[in-house]
Structures are given as C-alpha cells and as structure tokens.
Amino acid sequence: MDLYVFDNQFNLHGIIDSFKSLIWRREFYKTGSFELHLNLPEDFKESSDLLALVQKDRIIVKEDSPEEAAYIVGLKFDDKTEDTLVLTGFLIDNFLSERLIWEETSKTGTAEDVMKYFVERNAVSPELVRRKLPGLTISTNRNIEIPASETNSYGNLAEVIEGLAIKYDMGWRVLFDLANKQYIFDVFNGRDLSVNQNVNPRAIFSLEFENVLEQTYTDSNSGYKNMVLVAGQGEGAARKKVLLNNELEGFKRKEVFVDARDLSNVTDNTTLSDEEYEELLKQRGLTKLSECRSISTLEGSIILTSNLVYKVDFDLGDIVTTQNERLGVTLNTRITTVEEVYENDHRDVRVNFGSNIPTLLEKIEQRMR
C-alpha cells in the first residue's frame, strides 16, 4: 500500500511505497492518531530526501482510504537500536484543536446544527478573518434530529466538539477532499446493525462465529457518577444551583460537583430569565454525566476473511452485536474505535465495541497506576 505525502495546500510532495509498520487509529468521538515506522536508508542522499519529505505538518493519505488523512507532529530516530524513523501525528480532525471558542457562544438546535455552528463561528467563517482554517468547509446536513444545546467561552474547539459528540452519541470527522482541495467538517451517525433491528443486515461478532480472534471484556464503574450538583453564578446561599437526578438515594446515588461559575446569565447583551439560566446549568450537568458513564466493552481483533467485511458490513460508528458465550455477555453497542495495523504487507483490524470512551479510560488508567 502506498502512502501519499501532501502539504496543507494539497500539493503532492512524494509517495512512500515501503514502510515497516503503520498504526492508523480511527475514533468516533474524538480525533484519531497514527504511528508510522520507516527504514532510514543508509545512503546519505536517500536519507536526506526522506527527511525532507516527511516534515512536520505534512499530510499523509493512505491509498486504500483517500478521504482520510493525518498530519505529522513528531519525528524520532534512535540509531542505538534500529535504523528506524518513527513518525507520529493525528488525523486531520485535530486541526480543530488549534482554535478556541473565541467568545461566549450559545446555540440550541439539533446536535448536528450545534456542532457545525461552533466550527463555523470559530474556524470556517470567524469574524476575525485570520482565525480561519484555510480550505475548511462544512458538509451538507444529514438531518440527524437529536435536540441539543451548548454554551461555551474560550474552550478548545476540538474538545468542545468531542464533548458534544460524547454527550449526544454522535460521530465527527474532517474529510480530505483532494478533488476540490478542501477539508470537510462532517457530523455522522453510524448504522444500526444489531440484532434489535430488522431494517439493516445484522453484524454479530463472537468467537463462536469465528469472526474475531480473541476478546477482552471490561465492565467497570470506576469514575461512574449519576447525580450532579451544578453551581453557577453568585456567592454562598445565593449561588444559582441545579440538581440532576436528585431523587436517587442510598448506595445507588453517586454524586459529582460541577463548578459552572463561568456560565453568565447575560449573553449577547441579553439577560436570561431564571428558567433560561437554569437550562444552561442543566446542560452543563448533562455534559458532566456523559463523561462519567459506566464502561462496558468487548475488544477484539477482527478476522478480515470472515463472513463480515470491514467498511462494507461494519464500520466505525455502527451499532453491532458482540457476544461471548463463555461469559454469557451480549452487547448491542457502537464501534467507537478502529485501529488498523499494517505490517509486512498484512493488515490487522482491532475494534473496540462498547461505551469505551477514551477520555474515561485514560482517567481510570491514571487512577490505577
């Protein structure tokens, strides 16, 4: 498989036709990443030519999925072990991390509209023209009717979009459109391929069906919260507060606090009513609860020659059924992460099935160290 190397103006600089390994990690809720291992030629000129090609910020496109792209953020070489040049970086979704929510911004509508509004205001058509990300456009609406509301000031744009994606169970990405020389911000929702529906062909993964090599099951309540106290503006007893799921009691009640003092009751020179301000606080609380979910996952390596074909019968964002008869576990859940591994002209695909929200797992791993 060839790898094409572009600059961010869509100019092709070269082709990589040989590499040791490539890990290409696709994410549903957040930005993906990659790691590419290259043999550094012994010949000085060939080595210099390769280093000139794979400069930081250069964009890499895989031959087998030209609509996806990643950019280089780091290079590492250690001649004490192997003559290997290691490139690391992010999928171009991460372009959004270079922008802030420039001022207090509020939007109510569908989740798709809200996400696109924040990107439009801060990266596509910002008031301050120099903040525009060159070539970035917004995709045509898919009309995903999920009600949403968000208010944010000075947050990182990518993190805000990621938070909205987790909160409303939506996917997002930035597509590489070489033909029109543009980057397309897109919001999407996968297909329902689970056993609970009869509209689409079903996708069932299990050791018994011989379409996964092995499975790793995780079921964890570490970090799980279900009741939130949100405190907004004011001091002491006069501080505005909203409680969500306050009816829970005993061991079933798991509390978390959110300091939402940054949320103002004045927006666009308009003073919000008490009810409107409470709604803002409520939305902040719902965002926090979406980050504190219980985690239940079945991870496994897919057998690519099985009855289900990757990117045809299932793909990132699809809801599928996973089973492990030995454990008696059946999950109807979304594919949240796909890791493609290319090595020695062979491709492996590792899939994460379940509510394995990466930011949550990272927090859990940090607590357990």
Image (cartoon, rainbow, N blue to C red):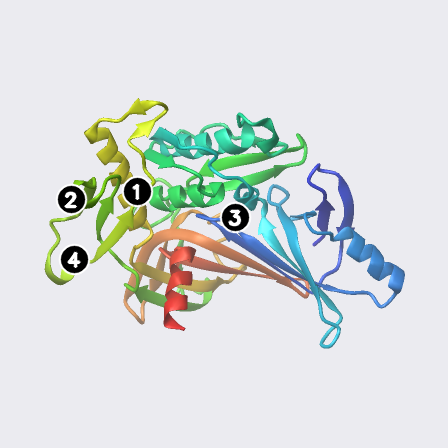
In this view, 293 is above or below 242: below
* Rendered location of residue 313, percent (x, y): 47, 48
Question: Tag 3, which secondary structure?
Answer: loop
The kind of residue on which mark 3 rests is: Lys
Sooner in the amino-acid sequence: mark 4 or mark 2: 2
Quadrant where the C terminus sits is: bottom left
Q: Which residue is mark 1?
A: 261
Label 3 crowd bin: few (<14), some (14–19), many (20+), radius 10 Å: few
Instruction: Nearest to the eye among marks 2 and 3: give it.
Output: 2
The kind of residue on which mark 4 rests is: Arg
Mark 4 and mark 2: Cα distance apart in space: 23 Å
Mark 1 and mark 4: Cα distance apart in space: 24 Å
Question: Tag 2, which secondary structure?
Answer: helix
Q: Is residue 249 left or right of residue 177?
A: left
Front-lying residue, 134 or 221: 134
The kind of residue on which mark 2 rests is: Ala
Which label belongs to residue 253?
Answer: 4
For image coordinates 38% across by 58% down, the residue present is: 360
The answer to the question of whether label 4 and label 2 lie on touching residues, with beta carbons closer than 8 A, is no
Viewer can see residue 207: no
Label 4 crowd bin: few (<14), some (14–19), many (20+), radius 10 Å: some
Front-lying residue, 236 or 203: 236
Viewer can see residue 240: yes
Residue 251, image quadrant: bottom left
In this view, 65 is above or below 210: above
Mark 1 and mark 2: Cα distance apart in space: 14 Å
Q: Which residue is mark 3?
A: 311
Question: Tag 4, which secondary structure?
Answer: loop
Instruction: Nearest to the eye among marks 1 and 4: give it.
Output: 1
Label 1 crowd bin: few (<14), some (14–19), many (20+), radius 10 Å: some
Mark 3 and mark 1: Cα distance apart in space: 44 Å
